[in-house]
Every structure is written in C-alpha cells, then in structure tokens.
C-alpha cells in the first residue's frame, strides 16, 4: 500500500530525512517512535504533501502511484489521512461544514453520491457518540477554542467519517489524559480493518497498550534504525533510545 | 451600438470614449461644470425653486473647496471640467437587444453569482421590457406599498410629488457643505431613491432598488433619502450585486437616513462596481457619503456593507446618535484585490444619553490591494452612559497587499465605556494545508476560510443577500492564490 524508498527531505538547507525505508501493507498497524526532533512529523508532513519540504532523493508510492507527485487534496481524496500533531483553528468555519465538504470530496473520488445535510448528520451522529463528543462541536468553528484533547478527538472523528485507506496519526496520544486516551484508542481500533493501514507516530508505549501495533520502528536522526514487534516498544520504554543509536552506529 | 461584443473590457472602454456624447446627443450636456449646467439640470427635471437654490448654494460652496487628500489612497487627479454632468438614461437602442447579444463571459459571471435571468438581462443593459414583464412586477409591488402608506419612488419623483418632505429633510443629515464630494453631488445629483415610512408602519417588504427598475441607470451622482417616521421600521437593500461594468469613472453618491422616535432603519449594501482589471487599469472611483441620524429616542440605524468592487472606495457610513437610548451599528466586509484601494469605516457620534454603537469591520487584502479601516467614535459631553464596541479584523492574502487601521476616539464624557479589539492575520498556510489535507481544493479552502472570517457580518445581511455576498467574494478572489 505504502512503499517508501531511501527518502531524503530537507527544509531549506537543513537535512531532516536521510534515507527512510518503510513498507506498509493493508491491514497492518505500524508504530513509529523516536526522540524529539528525529523527523517523525516531517515524514508525516511529506507524505501528506505540506509545502516547504524539498524531497532531494528517494520515492514514496501509494497504491502503486507516485504519492509525492499529487496535490495534498488529491492524496486525501485517494484515501490518505493525516491526524495532525497540532490541528489548526479556522475561525468562523463550521466544523460540520469542513467535514461535509471533505467527505463529499472523498465520496466523489470513490464514485459515490454526495450526501445532503440530512444524510450527513445521520452519519456523523453515530461517529460523534463513538468519540464521546457533544453535538455542539458540529456548529463550532473548526478547532476554535477546543482544548488540546478535544482537538485530538476531533481529528479521529474526521478519520472515522472519512474512512481513509492509509491513516497517519502524528502524536494523537500526546496531551491526552487517560480517559481521553481510551476514547481515542477505541475510535482508532474501531477503524482497524484488513483493507486499512495505520501508521502511528508516538513517544509513548502507553498508546500501544490500547492499539497493538504489528510493527514498531525507531526513527532517529532521519533514519529508521531498527524495526521490531511490539516488544521493541516495551524495551524502548525501559532503556530509552541511546542503545538503539549505539548499536546502529556499531553495525 | 456594440453588435457583437467579444471582450467586455473593450466594450466598456468603447462606451466610455464614444457613447456618452454621440449616441444620445440631444439629452447630454457637454462636459464642464458651472452655474448654467446646474440650472439646466434643474430645469430638465422641472424642479421647484427651492431645489435649484439649494443646488446653486452647493455648487458655490464646492467651488471654494479642495479635493480631499487625507484618505490612505492614491488617486489620479480628476478633471471635473471634462465630465458631462447630465446624460439622460441611455436610449434602449444602444444596448444589446437580447441576452444572445451579451458577452458570454459576463453572463457566465452572473450565473456563478446566481443572479436571476431577468436581473442578468437588466444588468447587462438589455432592454428589459423586451425580455420580461417588468411593468407588472413593479406594479404589484407598488400597490402593496401604497396600501401600507409607504412612499418609495425615484428622487426626481419625490421632488415633484412630495416637495414638503424633501425640503424638510434634504441635507438635514449630510449638509451640502459637508465635504467635497457631498457638495459636488448636491449641486449636480441626477436621481436616486426616496423612501418615507409613516408613523407606526412596518414596511411590508424589503425595499430594493431592483424593484424600481426605472432607476437602474441613475448614474454617477445618486442621492438617497430615507425617512422612518415614529415607531416605523424599514429594511433597504442597495444592490449592485453583480458586476455592473459601468462606464462611469467617478461615482459620488450621498445617502441620508433619518430615524425618528422608536424607528429603525436597516441599510444593506453589496457593492460590486467594476474594480478595474488585474493591472489596475480602469474601474470606478466610489466616493460616497452615507450618514444616518437617530433623531428620536430609542431609534436604531444599522449599516451593513459588503464592498468588493470599485478601483477606489472612499466611504464611511455613519450614525449620529442624537436621541436618547438610540443605537448605531456598522457591519462591514471590504475586499481589495489586484490594485484596488479601499478606505472605509464609520463614524459614531454619540450625543444622546445611553446611546450605544457597535462596529465590526472585516478587511480582506489580496494581490496588491490596500485596505484601510478608518473609524471615529466621538462621545460628546451630553452622552451620559454611552457605550461603544469596535472590532476590526484584517486578513492578508499574500505579501504584496496591505492593511491599515486608523481608529480615532474622542471621548468627552467620563461615563463612556469604549472597547476596541483589532487583529491582523495572514491567511495561514497552515489553515490552507489543513483544509486541503481533508480533500478540499485550494480554491474552495480559500473561500471557506475567507467566508469564515466574514461570517459575523454576513449574518447581518438579509438571507438572499448573504448568499450573493458569499458568491461575490468567491468570484472577486478568483485567482488570488496559487
Ligand atoms: N520549518 C522548519 N524549519 C527548520 N527546521 C525545522 C522546521 N520544522 C522542523 N524542523 C526541524 O526538523 C527536525 C525534525 O522535526 P520534526 O519532524 O518535527 O521532529 P519530530 O516530529 O520527530 O519531533 C527538528 O530538528 C526540527 O527542529
Ligand atoms: Mg512531531
């Protein structure tokens, strides 16, 4: 589904990704862990198509197509979804309005009929219950005045509505208390399916207690240094990242 | 006559150069402005003596004044002696005869705006009677108003049929000596609208110039006077809601509103005069004086404006709050794209006790557009307990445009409570990317974000107008990103 080969990316002259390789197949859940500043958000941003990054080397293919050649909205319509580490506020734009526009853009791409307001509301109400969000969030401005936890829940709500094929979650767990974490994890787990792949970026093992990954990768200084199963996350929790770096440089 | 116009701008330019004098020679005065010109205008309109005297006083005063230069605008010098000050409405033969003859590009824009078909025809200058029965629409409308006792007619008709009301109220809010353009307008105004709502009457419908089709070509010096008698209510829509690619260069209008005790007037404008092309060539100079007086206690005047057109806009719809407990409101969206310049805002003059005013101004700058908010909140010693809330927000798109804010305050009564909030933001790349990463196209994302920014103002507009205003913003912003 997603195939990243030797990906190099930089902002200005600053090199951030220095040869990332990653294969993600449908149905898999991957966790990417790593120290602050190692390039995790950069990787997610490059995959989603944020401007300002220059890919100097390597490729990323999604369902066989050159992902990096597509406009961000085109990627989204084809089923790539990024849950932002820092979701932005868009004052005055209804949360529901954006979500409906997004859903209809995706449905159009999939050859489905656009939903009218009533059909949309019916669909979204269930998803909001799942995310334990009050319906008043629909009529508020996008993320406007939301708390940190509410913003993250809103991201997963969007994901639940848009039903992407490839979901990239950038530190969706950070800033959440334990109850909110459980809600978010329930939301994500409800979306696990054999057709869908999920890539979670996280600092903490605790998210992985709720959402069990098939693979755990360690990204450090722009490279994936080590890949393992969920036991690797436990080991990282205990021993930190330094030993991974040392073993990698010794090799 | 333009038989097969292919390019609208060419058509406009062509009309400007030739159409004015040659086509309808007998009804057009040669360029230039002096007392004789004013006398001729007044005579053609068969005006009473008081009207001519007033025009002449205005002209003499204007001749002593200098073009103002205090606004944040770059204005090429205007040669007032090269303008013709009277031209009868264009004969129907000089416009396109049917929609088939109208530039398809223009029609496509109207369609995008959702302008009804007959309205499109009118805006494109088609002889309307030929396409639909304008007479019957106007008639049903007139009957309904007459039953309520509301007077709604052209200014010229009002001067002839209701001279007492005109004499009593004309210039009572905007005196002819008020400013350069008001003086000019007072001397030479061609026509406009007049509204009188009698005591205790709620006007049974929104009044709009659209229904008074005969006034569509009132030209560059219009004058509007609205009087809401005690306890009455009226909502007036002034609309050029589609690109009325007017050939005129200078548009100097005056609007006066008078609200007596317990009366309220809501005045909504969607202005989209020709803004000039993307290189700043051509376009309308929109120099307008709009002012309302809350003359009686508990009265209310509310201005809502969406200004997307014109090369230069110079406009400060204001409220004089004389009556105790009276309320003034100003809600504004002003957009400056390409080389457009907008200098707009309001004045709230608090005179009566417990008077309240609210100002919400949203400025959008794109391309090389320059947007200025200029506002004055003046609280006189008599205005015990006055309150004002002002909010000015600017949105910048790109880095070649500008936003400027000049909020003035003069507070002469210590009990006044005045609040001011101002923000300037760039249309954030983050917001754009966020929307696009959800599948929304860049253009739709820009429109969505801009509309979100303007929402508090749009919600003051009557429903149909709000939709048109949104569409208008979208059309005006086309091509401003990417
Ligand atoms: N806009 C930027 N300009 C310059 N450096 C940046 C920018 N954004 C991120 N970086 C740098 O790139 C590196 C990787 O950042 P990021 O991908 O956000 O890391 P992570 O998500 O793993 O914490 C960091 O050193 C960060 O400071
Ligand atoms: Mg990060």
Image (cartoon, helix red, strand yellow):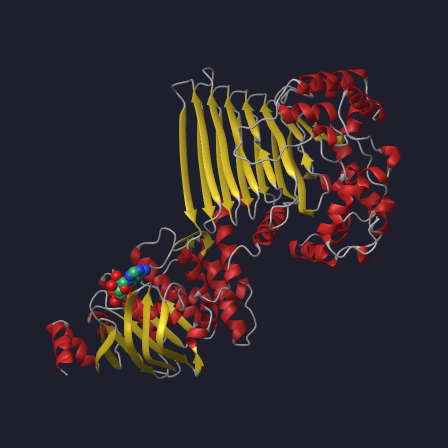
For this view, does B5 lie left or right of residue B385? right
* B118 or B74, nearer to the observer: B74
**What x and y, as percent, mark residue A55?**
36, 71
**What x and y, as percent, mark residue B463?**
61, 47
* A152 or A47, nearer to the observer: A47
- Residue B383 visible to an observer of this rendering: yes
Q: Residue at x 52, y 50 (%)?
A: B367
- Residue B150 visible to an observer of this rendering: no
For this view, does A205 lie left or right of residue B128? left
What is the count of numbered marks?
Answer: 0
Please say if A189 is above or below B136: below
Please say if A140 is above or below B180: below
Q: Quadrant of residue A177?
A: bottom left
**What x and y, as percent, mark residue B100?**
81, 58
Q: In which quadrant of the rendered image does the C terminus of chain A lie?
A: bottom left
Please say if A24 is above or below B80: below
Q: Residue at x 53, y 60 (%)?
A: B443
For this view, does A152 lie left or right of residue A120? left
Please say if A132 is above or below B461: below
Q: Quadrant of residue B459?
A: top right
Q: In which quadrant of the rendered image does the N terminus of chain A lie?
A: bottom left
* B480 or A48, nearer to the observer: B480
């Amino acid at each position: 589904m997603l195939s990243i080969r030797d990906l190099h990316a930089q902002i200005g002259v600053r090199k951030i990704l220095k040869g990332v390789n990653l294969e993600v197949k449908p149905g898999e859940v991957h966790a990417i862990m790593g120290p602050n500043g190692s390039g995790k958000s950069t990787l997610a941003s490059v995959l989603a198509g944020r401007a300002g990054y220059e890919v100097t080397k390597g490729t990323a293919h999604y369902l066989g197509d050159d992902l990096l050649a597509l406009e961000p909205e085109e990627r989204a319509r084809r089923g790539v979804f990024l849950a932002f580490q820092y979701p932005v506020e868009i004052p005055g734009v209804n949360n529901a309005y954006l979500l409906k526009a997004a859903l209809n853009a995706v449905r159009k791409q999939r050859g489905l009929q656009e939903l009218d307001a009533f059909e949309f509301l019916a669909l979204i109400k269930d998803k909001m219950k799942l995310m334990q969000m009050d319906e008043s969030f629909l009529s508020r401005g996008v993320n406007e005045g939301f708390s940190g936890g509410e913003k993250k829940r809103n991201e997963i709500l969007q994901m639940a509505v848009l039903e992407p094929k490839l979901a990239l979650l950038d530190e969706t767990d950070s800033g959440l208390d334990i109850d909110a974490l459980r809600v978010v994890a329930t939301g994500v787990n409800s979306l696990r399916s054999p057709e869908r792949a999920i890539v979670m970026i996280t600092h903490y093992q605790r998210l992985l207690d709720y959402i069990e990954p098939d693979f755990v990768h360690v990204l450090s200084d722009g490279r994936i240094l080590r890949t393992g199963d969920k036991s690797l996350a436990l080991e990282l929790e205990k021993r930190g990242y330094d030993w991974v770096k040392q073993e990698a440089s010794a090799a | 006559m333009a038989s097969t116009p292919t390019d609208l701008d060419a058509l406009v330019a062509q009309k400007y150069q030739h159409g004015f004098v040659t086509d309808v020679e007998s009804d057009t005065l040669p360029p230039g402005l002096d007392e004789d010109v004013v006398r001729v205008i007044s005579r053609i309109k068969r005006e009473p003596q008081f009207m001519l005297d007033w025009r002449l006083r205005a002209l003499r005063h204007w001749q002593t004044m200098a073009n103002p230069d205090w606004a944040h605008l770059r204005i090429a010098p205007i040669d007032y002696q090269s303008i013709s000050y009277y031209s009868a409405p264009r004969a129907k033969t000089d416009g396109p005869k049917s929609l088939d003859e109208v530039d398809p590009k223009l029609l496509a824009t109207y369609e995008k705006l959702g302008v009804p078909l007959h309205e499109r025809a009118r805006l494109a200058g088609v002889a309307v009677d030929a396409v639909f029965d304008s007479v019957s629409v106007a008639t049903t409308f007139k009957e309904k108003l007459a039953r309520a006792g509301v007077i709604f007619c052209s200014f010229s008709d009002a001067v002839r049929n209701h001279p007492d009301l005109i004499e009593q109220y004309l210039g009572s809010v905007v005196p002819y000596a008020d400013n350069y353009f008001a003086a000019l307008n007072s001397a030479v105004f061609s026509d406009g609208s007049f509204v009188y709502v009698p005591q205790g009457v709620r006007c049974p419908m929104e009044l709009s110039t659209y229904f008074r089709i005969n006034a569509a070509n009132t030209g560059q010096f219009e004058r509007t006077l609205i009087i809401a008698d005690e306890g009455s209510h009226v909502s007036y829509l002034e609309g050029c809601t589609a690109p009325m690619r007017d050939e005129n260069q200078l548009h100097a209008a005056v609007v006066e509103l008078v609200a007596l005790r317990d009366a309220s007037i809501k005045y909504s404008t969607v202005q989209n005069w020709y803004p000039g092309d993307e290189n700043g060539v051509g376009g309308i100079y929109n120099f307008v004086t709009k002012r309302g007086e809350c003359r009686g206690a508990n009265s209310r005047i509310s201005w809502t404006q969406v200004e997307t057109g014109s090369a230069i806009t110079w406009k400060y719809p204001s409220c004089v709050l004389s009556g105790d407990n009276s309320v003034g409101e100003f809600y504004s969206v002003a957009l400056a794209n390409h080389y457009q310049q907008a200098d707009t805002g309001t004045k709230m003059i608090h005179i009566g006790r417990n008077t309240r005013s609210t100002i919400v101004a949203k400025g959008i700058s794109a391309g090389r557009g320059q947007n200025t908010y200029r506002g004055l909140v003046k609280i006189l010693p008599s205005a015990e307990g006055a309150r004002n809330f002002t909010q000015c927000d600017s949105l910048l798109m790109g880095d070649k445009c500008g936003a400027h804010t000049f909020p003035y305050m003069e507070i002469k009564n210590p009990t006044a409570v005045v609040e001011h909030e101002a923000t300037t933001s760039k249309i954030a790349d983050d917001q754009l990317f966020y929307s696009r990463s959800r599948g929304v196209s860049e253009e739709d994302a820009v429109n969505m974000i801009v509309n979100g920014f303007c929402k508090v103002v749009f919600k003051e507009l009557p429903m149909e107008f709000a939709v048109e205003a949104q569409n208008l913003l979208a059309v005006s912003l086309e091509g401003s990103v990417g």
